[in-house]
Image: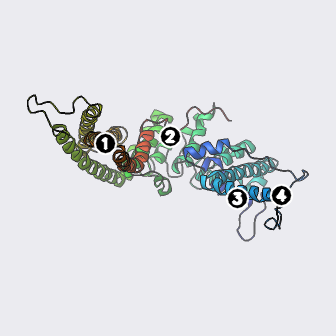
Amino acid sequence: MATKTDDVLKSNALIRLSTSPQIFPSASQPAFWQQFIFSCIWSKPIVATNDTVRIYVPAQRLRESKNIVLQVLSQLRVFAKNLFTFLGIKQMYDLKKIHIYSDKILRCMCEHISSLDYEEQLKASVHPAFHSAVKNGTLEFIMEMIKACPHVMICTDDNSRTLFMSSIANRQEKVVSLFYGLEATRSGFVSLIDSSGNTMLHLAAKLSPPSQLSRISGAALQMQRELQWYKEVESIINPTDKDFANVKGQIARELFTSDHADLLLKGEEWMKATATSCTVVGALIITIMFTAAFTVPGGYVQESGYPIFKDKESFTVFIVSDAISLFSSSTSVLMFLGILTSRYAEEDFLKSLPTKLIIGLSTLFFSIATMMVTFCAALMIIVDGKLQIIIPIVLVACIPVTFFMMLQFPLLVEIFVSTYGPGIFNKKLKRWY
């Protein structure tokens, strides 16, 4: 069944499996809390045909039963099921079960294919299925297929591209990471060219497919990712291949500049729009905090000029948080002004501009949080410890900080991981072949 061609679809089960990356773990990208749930879930092993299967059938007349214990247990079961669905536990359980079954199917298929000779493998469309898996980034399919048919590692697609060349062109970083799990066979891949005379560096210099670019938020971060791809592949190839020209007479660097000219302009516009918006917010906070420092609650003693409530702990909190908010917002505005006055060269999107954006967003968030603390401290001084007034207002004051965190914190984390994270490729991958 793995290699039998369907008369209607004109494909077999092997090709259909290679075009379904969503059923494999490598294509799943759950959130960190979902990953924790996924790792804690225990799944039953796949039941063989000769095993005994026990099926639970709920009683048809449970509602009519007078047994209160059974009714309570039934309601608890329904509640637990709804709770698991709400928390995403059931979704993660179903996903893990899909991964187990897809892995079992894949291993059975590869076991059958390994028993075929070369001509039978060609007839079974092993090569098209393999390159389809490379294009979709199905890591498990690729590794099992190479172990079953080692020759597919050097087979080429319609553009004369091998495994790693195709994965670079389609921006499948997990597949390219397999390069670091090879030993003596690495050098045989780095100097190959495709039907258009493109090297691996030329393919990295081309613009990513739209489906891959859409996964990254913001044109500036997309430009950064493109530069990271180019730099990583540049470190792999031989230094003499950097100046190699394709059939159009372009070297890789020239191809990168021409293909990314539009994305460079969009990245500049995105950076300037973000910096302008945040600069306005930061300037408003500076004005407010500077004014609040000289109009302290309660006023001043006429004879000495000292604040009336200078000995109160809440007044100390007021002054300290006001100063921190003023300094952090000033730093934020300076960082965003630095972004607005940058030259916006290609290399600036790699480290310089993202670093300024990280500092600017972090200090702006910190200034908003300390501004709310300043407000709450001033309120405590004015109402003189009336908790029935203080507590509701403090809770309401947390709303803007929470909103800002929900809107901007994911972007801040994404920029930080993209700039200072472990990198695109897994260079510490253990030898797998």
Please tell me which residue is depicted at 14% across the width and 30% down the height of the picture: 306
Mark 3 or 4, which is nearer the eye?
A: 3
Q: Amino acid at mark 3?
A: Val
Q: Is residue 244 visible?
A: no
CA–CA distance between discs 1 and 2? 44 Å
The residue nearer to you, when weighing 423 against 100, is: 100
Q: Which mark is residue 56?
A: 4
Q: Answer left or right for 300 relative to 412.
A: left
Distance in Å between CA atoms under marks 3 and 4? 15 Å
Determine whether label 1 and label 4 are within 8 Å by CB: no
Here the colouring is rainbow
Quadrant placement of the C terminus: top right
Please name the amino acid that badge 1 sits on: Cys
Percent from the top left, x then y, of residue 228? 44, 41
Residue that badge 3 annotates: 78
Mark 2 vs mark 4: which is more N-terminal?
Answer: 4
- Residue that carries the numbered disc 1 in the rendered image: 376
Classify residue 74 as left or right of residue 48: left
Seen from the viewer's position, the closer of residues 184 and 421 is 421
Q: Nearer the viewer, residue 306 or 243?
A: 306
Task: Report how far apart the C-alphas of labels 2 and 4 lie in the structure.
Answer: 47 Å
